[in-house]
Image (cartoon, grey):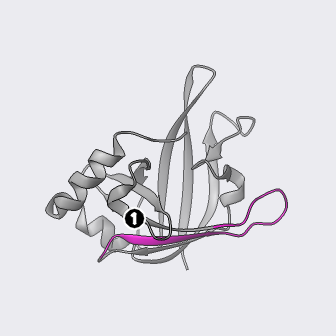
Amino acid sequence: MKKVLYLGAIALFVASCKPTMDTKSQVGLKGNWTLVKVNRLGGDLVKVNSFNIADADCFVGSQWNFVSNNNTGHLALTKAGNCPAFESDFKWTISPAGQFEFKFIDEGVKAKHITTGYSMHVKNQTATSFELVDKFYAGGQAYDVTYKFVKN
């Protein structure tokens, strides 16, 4: 599921070419959001380790903050049970093709020095909700995982 899709080069390119970003989509994400549902095309029997952190279901209820003027954000994963607690800042952008690209930023490390990240497609964006669709591969087949967000 890890997307190391040349993100280092893409992130540097995107950061240096802000006019090529989808500004309207980015401004639309500004604010606080809750991830309310994870849908796996291919069934719930397929386990997905989202962002190399935890099972995709652990992200239901997670809190995300997007700041559009500097493309920063914060994620807080606080679901109990077998889910780990996790918090991290991240850098993000949306390309004109609708690709949401982000990478976690470790404390004390500049974003330009982080070369791995994730790329997903933005879908069904409104003022109060949006979805991110990720592709993953299991057993030689491609599957979609859709993360649905609602605005707080």
Q: Which residue is identified by label 1?
A: 91
Looking at the rendered structure, the kind of residue marked 1 is: Lys
Viewer-proximal residue among 90 and 57: 90
Position of residue 133 relative to residue 65, above or below, is: above
Q: Which quadrant does the C terminus fall into?
A: bottom right
Name the side, left or right, on which 118 lies relative to 152.
left
Closer to the camera in the image, 6 or 140? 6
**Residue at screen point 71% across, 53% down:** 57
Report how many numbered discs are placed on residues in the image.
1
State whether residue 113 is above or below residue 41.
Answer: below
In the image as oriented, which residue stretches furthest toward the top?
140
Q: Give the magenta-colored segment's residue range.
A: 70-86
- Which residue lies at the image location 71% right of the left edge and 39% below the top edge? 47
Q: Is residue 38 above or below residue 48?
A: below
81 within the magenta span? yes
The residue drawn where x is 72% and y is 40% is: 44
Residue 20 x %, y %? 17, 57
Quarter of the image holding residue 122? Answer: bottom left
Nearest the camera: 59 or 2?
Answer: 2
Q: Please state, as top left, top right, bottom left or bottom right, where the N terminus lies in the image.
A: top right
Residue 125, image x, y percentages = 40, 62
Please give left or right for residue 87 compared with residue 2 in the image: right
44 horizontally vs 148: left or right: right
* Closer to the camera in the image, 149 or 8: 8
- Helix, strand or loop at disc 1? strand
Mark 1 crowd level (few <14, some 14–19, many ≥20, 10 Å Cα): many
Tell me, yes or no, whether the highlighted magenta stretch contains residue 74. Answer: yes
Residue 13, image x, y percentages: 21, 52
Image location (x, y in percent) of residue 22: 24, 61
Residue that lies at the very extreme toward the right in this rendered image = 81
